[in-house]
Every structure is written in structure tokens, then in C-alpha cells.
Image (tube, rainbow, N blue to C red):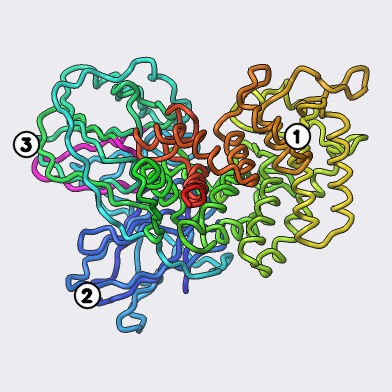
Amino acid sequence: MEVFKLKHSIKPNSLLQVEFPSGIEFDEIKIVSSCFYSIFFDGDLVQFGPYRRTCDHLNLNSLKLEGNTNELELRITYYGVPSFDIETREFLFGIELYKNSELVTSSKDIKLYFDKTYISESNKYSFQRGFVERYDLTLNRPIQYIELEEATKFEIISEYKDTCLYKKEEPVIKDSGSFKGFNKSYKGKNNYYDKTSNFIVDDILNSLDNGHLFYQYQFNSDVTGIFHLEIESSEVQTIYLVFDEYLPLGKWEFFRARCSDLIEIKLNKGINAIYSNVPYTCMHVMLISEHKIVVNHLESVLIQNDMIKVQLTGDKRIDNILLASSRTFAQNAVDLFTDCPGRERAGWLCDSYFSGIAEPFYTGNHNIEKAFLENFLYESSPEIPEGMVPMCYPSIHQDHTFIPNWSLWFIVEIERYFNDSKDFVLINKLKEKVYKILNYFKKFENEYGLLENLESWEFIEWSDATEDRYIKPVSFVTNMLYKGAIESAANLYFDKDLLEKSKDLCKTINELSFNGKYFRDNARRIDDKLVVTPNLISETAQYYAFFFNIRNDDQYFENVFNAKDDKTIVGSAVFIGKFLRLLNLYRKEKYQAIIDEFVPYFEKMANITGTLWEKEAPEASCNHGFASVFGAVLFDCYKKTSK
């Protein structure tokens, strides 16, 4: 396939349209792209892509079409700035159209031009993703074509089978009337402005307090998709599509999850139809207008994995959580594992460990995890140190931040993936990457063989246990993970030296950190001597210790089992402490204990949003992929306790 790149740079946040030769007939499309794109056939969205890979290793997406009119529209969203949800270091695009398996046109025959109605000047949607979408449907700017030239530095590595069926879901209207404004405390907190833009989201919020109308809608549960609107207006006016996953106390708090959940649209007089460029996640939607509008159509075209199977038990309470788990997985496993489908849509390590356990329960295979891990095989990130891997990928980390712990979880995940899939080919391909990671850490080993003073963002979990006083300069929790990663590499590649190193590290952690009941989190330097901090003990440290077999005798497990009720130690967060607890209990076959403890915990989430959350309270993402593992565990626990 011929693939083209930009001959000259273009402005960030551009929406591009593809112009095809006139009069052609076709029934199949093949496409590669380094940017997000949408294909519309006879007015309907039929594919959102790409299947995300690295910037120069592309997937070929194929699409067979049925219909008579052959009205084809293809839009490409070009960020032009670093993001966590795609790695676009260079614009690459190629396309072929076929009729009865015969090529009828290709990349050299098409033209690209800027969309006439899209406004590039905008703020970032979130730190991790692209831009707030802005449209002026009254514009009719002359077509401005974009010069392309043939690209040579790329590789098409595989063909992707779409997991989406592009189902449509409509919300129901809940309320309408005079708009009274947002919660003021959430204004002014978007620090992710495009510095070249005069457009400020806060300016919009300030302008909406008086004289506007609102139309509020609600989906049955949290959904992820491309917005599709058809709105009738008797005059030219600007409307705003606002959305969120959760309304605290039933009130709109803009920027609740640190996203600018907003699309601006200037309407023409008459009927206006529009699709959003990229997917968004929400349960609640509000249209805010200057004057009265008629909403003919409002829906989300779902971007989710429709190939999953939903397994239920017949118990309504359990099935409610299983459905929430399946929705969560489906929206976070479209082309790769993502942490959340809204704020970030990013392929985070560590989250992926738990999603990987869940995948065979929902799909019967490991296809998404394989693709996720393969991306790291091709990854090259000059923004971070040699030997390290990005904390999430495909992405660009312009601020040079990385989480060293997540590279260790990467190795642990590879072993678990191999044990489940027996994929010898991928494991052998990843060997060099694994050893480079371990070599990176050698320079941080102290006289005890413990990692000390790691670079960048040393992260344990979302609790006080990740504060510097717990992890600097020596975190025993990080070193438990280090032991686990070394042992995983030893098992994968039959490395006796690494196996001995993991045993030595395990012994050292036991000798220094264990106080007879609990493992302590921290050691620090006093007069250049390493001294254990006696009073810094976290619940999560105990879960790491048992999970990585630092200590796994029955007496210690009793300590682990009761740790959640011990008020003298720092409690765990949902991610990842409580999920390590879940897997530890599952390993010890405490099936009824899991049901008794975790069902009430996740039931409230399922009841509120129909999905499972990032944190215990709905203060962040309400749809987090790693949490879907609970559905797999719960189903098995229920079956084993119901016999």
C-alpha cells in the first residue's frame, strides 16, 4: 500500500477531510493511519480507527460495505501535540478502495483538505488527550488542500478485525428550562490550555450563567461513543454539548474528572447534523442553547468491544455487578487495554495486568492483551531513559515522566500472559526488552541489593503509601515488586542467576522489613546507614508481600486477611491495594469472603453508573478497565459457593 505523509507542517488540532475521485464504485476499503479517523457510509458511522500501534508500525484496517449509494466520507483528526491516547510523531495515511476484490483507487488518487467548519483554536480536552471540539456550521470557507508526499519509514505489521458493531444508544430527556450555571468551585481549574489560543473554556462557562436554556438527558448507564446530533434552530446561535459520567448530588460540576467535557457548535438556521470527531464517555448529557432548539436526534454511536460474551448467574444482585463489569471491560478493550475510555483512553501498564486476567472471561482469548504487549515490542520513546518503557503506550511523554514500577509490572504481566496463552513467539521477541529493563535498574541497587532513590514517578497506589515519606529513599513495596519481576524473568527465560537474585532479595526484605506481624514500608539514611522506619506501615505493603511471595505462610496470611480492619496502619486504595487483596483472597480460595466483602463495595457503583470505578468515590473516572477483573473473579466465586 502507498502511504503518504505531510509535505509541510500544519496547525495542531486540525480536522481533515478526504476527497475521492468522482464516479468510482467500491465495496471494500483498506486503510492505514497514524491518526484517529472516522468513516461514514451513507451517513452512518461504520468505522472508527485506527487500531493503535506505534507511530511507524501500522495496522491495516479493512472494511467491507453494503449499500447502493456509495456516499463515503472520511475524516481524520490530527492532534499535532503529544498525547497519551495515540502516538502521532508523524502524520501517515494510506487508503485503497476495491470493487469485487479489484483495486479501483488508492492513496495517490485522493486529496486531503481542511474541514470547512472546524475551529482549530481551542483548549486541551484533558492533559492526556486532544482538544475541545469546536464547530461553526455557518462557515463556508474555500477548500484548502494539503500537500502530501510519499512516506518510506513505516511498516504495516498486521491486519485488524474491528471489534465494534457501532450500535446506537439514545438517552432519554430528564429536564429542561432556564440554565442556572455550573458549580462555581470547578471553574478555573483547567491548566491544559493551548498557549497559542485565545479560546478559554472558562470564558464559555462564565457566559452561560444567565439567559440560556438547557435540555438534560440521561443514558441508562455509562456509555462510550461518538456523539451524533441533529438539531433544528430557527436562527443562527451557538449551543454547547456538555456531558459527564456522574452528577454529584444531582448537580453539574464542570471539570469534575479533570476533563473539559464540552463541545461547542455554532448552528445555522434550519436543520444541523454533526458527529463528534472522537469518542467520549458519559451517562449524563446537557445541551445549552441561546434560544429554543428542537432536538430531532441525539445519540451515542458506541465505541466498545461487541465481541465479548456476558456470563450471568440468575442472581439479580450478582448479575447487576457482572453486567457493570462487562460494560467496563467492553469500553476499555476495543483495540488495546485502556485505563478509562473517557479522560485518557490510554494503554496503561499495571492496569493492563488486571485487564489481562479478565479478558479470557469476556472473550475466550487473549487477543487484546497480545496486541497491547506487542506495542511495547515496537516502542521507542526518546523522552525517557534508555532501557525504560513508557508508563502508558502508544503515547508521547513530552515532560519525560515515567513510572519505573510500571516497567516491573510489565515483566510480571508478560509471565502471567505466557502462563495463560503459551505464546512462545511473543515471549521470545520480548526477551531483549525485558533484560534491558532489568539492566536499567542495576544502577539503583544499594549495598543490600535494594532499589534506592528511583527516578521520576515512583508510584505504589492511590493512597498515602505512595507519599515520599513511605517510598524515599527505599521503598520495600517497590522492592517486593522488583523481586517479583526478577523472578518472572527468571521463569520466562530459564535464568538461574536471576532466580537466585530474586531469592536473595526476598530474604533481604524479610530480614529488614518484617517486624513479626507486618512488613514496614520504608527505610532511610541516617549517618549514611540504612535504617528502617518503624512506624510507617501500610495495608498495601502486606498485599504486595503476599502477592509476590515475600512471605506466604498461613499465619502471615491471617495478618493479611485482617489488615483492612487494622486502624494502626495506612489503608489501601482501590487501585491497586484492594485489587491485590482480591487476588490474594482468590488464590487462597476464600470465595465466600470475597462475595461478602466485595459485592457491597461494587454494588453501589453498578447501581449508580452501571460501570466500575477508578476510586471508591466518583471523584475521577467512573469506568476503569482494571476493575472489570472483579466480574471474572465474582462469577467463579459465585459458582463455587453455590454448589
In three-dimensional space, the C-alpha distance between marks 2 and 3, rounded to whole angstroms, equals 36 Å
Give the amino acid type for the residue marked by disc 1 in the picture. Gln
**Residue at numbered disc 1:** 555
Q: Amino acid at mark 3?
A: Ser
Query: Residue at point 40% right, 39% down?
Result: 131
Q: Residue at x 56, y 53 (%)?
A: 356
Q: Is residue 185 left or right of residue 528?
A: left
Kind of residue at badge 2: Gly
Magenta stretch: dominant secondary structure? strand
Q: Which sits earlier in the primary sequence, circle 2 or circle 1?
A: 2
Q: Nearer the viewer, mark 2 or mark 3?
A: 3
Q: Earlier in the sequence, mark 3 or mark 1?
A: 3
Question: In this figure, which residue is indicated by the disc labeled 3?
Answer: 234
- Within 10 Å of the Cα at label 3, are there few (<14), some (14-19), or many (20+) other Cα atoms? some
Residue 272 on the magenta segment = yes
Q: CA distance from mark 2 to mark 1?
A: 77 Å
- Element under disc 2: loop
Mark 2 neighbour class, 10 Å CA radius: few under 14, some 14 to 19, many 20 or more = few
Q: Position of residue 106 (x, y in %)?
A: 38, 73
Residue at 45% x, 26% y is 617
- Between 141 and 154, the residue placed more toward the observer is 154
Residue position marked by numbered label 2 in the rendering: 23
Q: Which residues are magenta?
A: 261-283
Say which residue appears at 52% left-offset and 33% top-offset: 597
Residue 89 appears in view: yes
- Of circles 3 and 1, the one toward us is 1
